[in-house]
Image: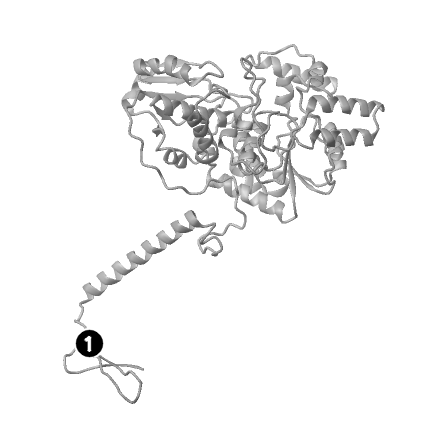
């Protein structure tokens, strides 16, 4: 039993008596506490507050580091997210800045769509790291078909990009003032590097230019590093940039969480990357199913872009070689043949489908639960990314990674990079369609020379193991365009499951 009271003997002293019960005996303990001024009390309170907050911050840090084992089950009062994106990199402890002799500054201008640029950025970081140069935050393509004015920081978290890689390469948002002046005066060297090059090309050809001119500008960046034959540390750095450093902005991530939450509330969902937009068809020359007027428009577009080198294209021959995206009508038959439940939610990750509603009728009839981001979100949600194709593609990218199944109808850059990222996330199911085989089967079925049962069983059988399982990349010496793309299967970076790698 504890009793406290104030004594009158010493003015501000407090007396405490502690009565310990036991066998009728009592002991007294008397303590005195020195009087405190208001300033001392304030100081003690401030120190206590700082200590408490320090403890709390360390506790939260432990939650990030050991969360899955220790604190994962704690409900955080600081987080209001109902859905976590597995694609979003976890917070990491920043490495110390790498100390090295700087050989110059590397400026890069990316070309192409979002995923083409994404892979290029990974390559450029690896090149900068092994040339010991400072990388300037890459400039994104604004002159392509999409005319997207987005800057790097509009799509990616630029602070995370710079700080998460500080142990590998020095990255600056812009050139130092004196070098910026040199560039404005034209005192730098600009060139498109040779495609599919080994790191020795950059060591022997690009590094001397950097040492001479101090600033080198690489004005084309897609597929500038080889798929194979590179040191393991380069391959792993490409992965680290892709899967950790290139984090989308918080606004895009939040929108991704919202879409995934809406979809998951209704059950499993499949993402269909229906690559049947006007630019794709014009570039590839694939016109199967288009009417005469549509074919003419596509041809005019192809001739309007001088950097699209192939102008005269035999559409049917290209289709039979499996080099065309599946049409919406073909896609409906293939998904049905694969045994996809007609009532499953299918999220369309694509822009405007060429031919509009007319071309989508068969797919909508076969799978009535087709949805787009515009169907799931309010117009106000999409305001900040409207008319910004790369930011819209970033949203589709996040949803694609989270889907129960990903089905691309063409093996373009998004299909390949998403495939590789889903492998990294645990070999999530990705249907890799054999288009050359499929168009032959489709033509036979449509002509009546193949029954539905024969068509369906053949499609299922040939695609049973084409689901993004572990396998070795196909290497074709001197034909890098024909071999497996590094970012579709970054085998050097994958945590393999029990199944061993196999060659295909």
In this figure, which residue is indicated by the disc labeled 1? 31
Circle 1 SS class: loop
Instruction: Say which quarter of the image contains residue 22.
Output: bottom left
Q: Residue at x 14, y 82 (%)?
A: 9
View extreme (top): residue: 312
Residue 73 image point, x, y percent: 49, 55
| In this view, 230 is above or below 53 | above
Residue 106 image point, x, y percent: 37, 21
Q: Nearer the viewer, residue 368 or 352?
A: 368
Residue 445 image point, x, y percent: 81, 25
View extreme (bottom): residue: 24
**In the picture provided, is 260 more to the left or to the right than 441?**
left
Instruction: Say which quarter of the image contains residue 421.
Output: top right
**In the picture provided, is 222 more to the left or to the right than 419?**
left
**In the picture provided, is 51 more to the left or to the right than 503?**
left
Residue 358 appears in view: no
| In this view, 184 is above or below 496 | above
């Amino acid at each position: 039993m504890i009793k406290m009271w104030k004594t009158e003997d010493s003015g501000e002293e407090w007396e405490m008596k502690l009565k310990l019960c036991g066998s009728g005996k009592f002991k007294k303990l008397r303590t005195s506490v020195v009087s405190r001024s208001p300033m001392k009390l304030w100081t003690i309170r401030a120190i206590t507050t700082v200590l408490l907050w320090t403890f709390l911050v360390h506790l939260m840090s432990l939650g990030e580091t050991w969360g899955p084992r220790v604190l994962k089950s704690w409900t955080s009062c600081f987080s209001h997210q109902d859905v976590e994106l597995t694609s979003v990199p976890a917070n990491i402890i920043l490495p110390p800045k790498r100390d090295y002799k700087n050989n110059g500054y590397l400026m890069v201008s990316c070309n192409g769509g979002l995923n083409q640029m994404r892979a290029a950025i990974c390559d450029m970081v690896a090149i900068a790291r092994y040339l010991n140069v400072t990388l300037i935050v890459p400039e994104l393509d604004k002159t392509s078909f999409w005319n997207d004015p987005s800057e790097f920081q509009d799509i990616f978290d630029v602070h995370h990009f710079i700080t998460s890689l500080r142990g590998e390469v020095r990255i600056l948002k812009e050139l130092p003032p004196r070098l910026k002046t040199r560039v404005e005066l034209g005192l730098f060297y600009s060139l498109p590097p040779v495609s599919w090059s080994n790191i020795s090309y950059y060591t022997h050809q690009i590094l001397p230019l950097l040492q001479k001119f101090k600033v080198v500008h690489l004005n084309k960046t897609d597929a500038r590093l080889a798929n194979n034959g590179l040191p393991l540390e380069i391959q792993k750095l490409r992965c680290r940039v892709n899967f950790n450093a290139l984090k989308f902005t918080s606004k895009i991530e939040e929108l991704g969480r919202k879409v995934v939450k809406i979809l998951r509330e209704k059950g499993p969902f499949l993402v269909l990357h229906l690559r049947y937009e006007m630019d794709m068809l014009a570039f590839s020359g694939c016109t199967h199913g288009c009417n005469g007027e549509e074919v003419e428009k596509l041809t005019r577009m192809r001739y309007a872009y001088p950097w699209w080198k192939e102008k005269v294209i035999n559409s049917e021959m290209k289709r039979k070689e499996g080099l065309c995206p599946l049409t919406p009508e073909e896609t409906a038959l293939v998904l049905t043949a694969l045994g996809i439940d007609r009532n499953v939610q299918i999220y369309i990750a694509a822009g405007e489908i060429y031919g509009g509603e007319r071309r989508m009728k068969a797919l909508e009839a076969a799978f009535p639960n087709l949805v787009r981001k515009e169907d799931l979100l309010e117009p106000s949600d999409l305001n900040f990314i409207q008319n910004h194709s790369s930011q819209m593609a970033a949203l589709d990218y996040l949803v694609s990674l989270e889907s129960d199944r990903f089905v691309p109808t063409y093996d373009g850059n998004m299909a390949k990079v998403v495939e590789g990222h889903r492998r990294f996330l645990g070999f999530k199911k990705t249907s890799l369609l054999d288009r050359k085989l499929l168009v032959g089967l489709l033509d036979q079925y449509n002509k009546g020379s193949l029954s539905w049962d024969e068509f369906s069983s053949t499609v299922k059988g040939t695609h049973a193991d084409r689901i993004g399982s572990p396998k070795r990349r196909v290497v074709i010496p001197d034909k890098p365009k024909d071999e497996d793309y590094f970012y579709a299967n970054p085998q050097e970076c994958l945590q393999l499951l029990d199944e061993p790698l196999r060659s295909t």
